[in-house]
Amino acid sequence: MWPGKTSRIMHHNALHCLTILAVLHIKAYGQDVMSTDELLRQLRSKPLNPAVLEKVDRFRGRPVAIGEIQQLFSQANEQVEKQHLARALVRIGAADAAAYEYLSTIARQAIERNPPTPFPVDTTGHLVKGRRSPQFVEWCKEKGMTEDVCLVTVTRSDLRDVLLLSSTNDRRNVPLLLRGLESTNAQVVALSAQGLAWLGANDFVPRVAAACSRFSKDEATLIGIMLFEFNDDTADAAGRRYVSDERAIRVFKEQAKRRVEHR
């Protein structure tokens, strides 16, 4: 899914980011047929399997499914489970302001965290893995977190939180995703760009391209590959300034084309 150099960067920094691979094909083409009763049975099973919530799109607008998920959302105490339920409610069109507010509030915290780049950058513009940048170490101390907890927060938890919002494909996301493009966390910038692409917000391609210029070569590649998600010639040309891996480009272009065809 993440070929070549781009694969190594994303895989290293977001190995345990929940749903980061599943949502890349969020339309779930060719899903198996499931009755409402079966969906409700699986939703009521404990612990809740987030993969079940990837199947709710087909029940968009069905009151019985919406009501069940709303009840589960109101009863959930664990943050990630509650986020997944909130995301499902937004995706199936539930008129539930609390669900969207819950998702967006947590994503906003991730976007506004603004950590320094965790890894040092060498003289060629590449990240040096296995070491921590002095700026990041100092930032962790200021936040009162150990380096390990800090690293997990900015390279896993924050990415999950942004992704769970952006993958709702809700137009209300645009202002927050634009703020995400201004983050100092390159991975947050990349996911914000991807979220805008999923919304077909091609007017913001120049802002995504401009964001690439603020980062190291490796980080710019991670952001630049998302330009191919826009299914737009201008975005493609901008992306090629930062990405040379033709296989990666082909994967993301094909992905964008399928998404447009299934809108």
Image: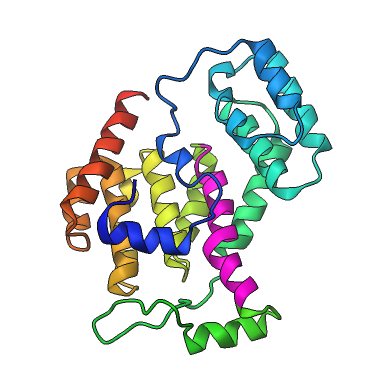
Q: Is residue 212 magenta?
A: no
Q: Residue at x 44, y 53 (%)?
A: 191
Residue 12 horizontal/vertical position (percent): 43, 63
Q: Is residue 63 left or right of residue 226?
A: right
Q: Residue at x 80, y 40 (%)?
A: 76
Residue 66 horizontal/vertical position (percent): 69, 22
Residue 91 falls in image quadrant = top right
Chain part drawn in magenta: 148-168
Q: Is residue 173 left or right of residue 219?
A: right
188 versus 76 height, above or below: below
Q: How many marks?
A: 0
Residue 40 horizontal/vertical position (percent): 71, 18
187 versus 67 height, above or below: below
User: In the rendered image, is residue 26 in sight?
Assistant: yes
Which residue is more in the foreground, 180 or 9?
Answer: 9
Report the predominant secondary structure element of the magenta stretch: helix
* Quarter of the image that includes the C terminus: top left
* Quarter of the image that includes the N terminus: top left
118 versus 158 height, above or below: below
Residue 34 falls in image quadrant = top right
Residue 187 horizontal/vertical position (percent): 44, 62
Q: Residue at x 34, y 61 (%)?
A: 8
Q: Is residue 120 left or right of residue 136?
A: left
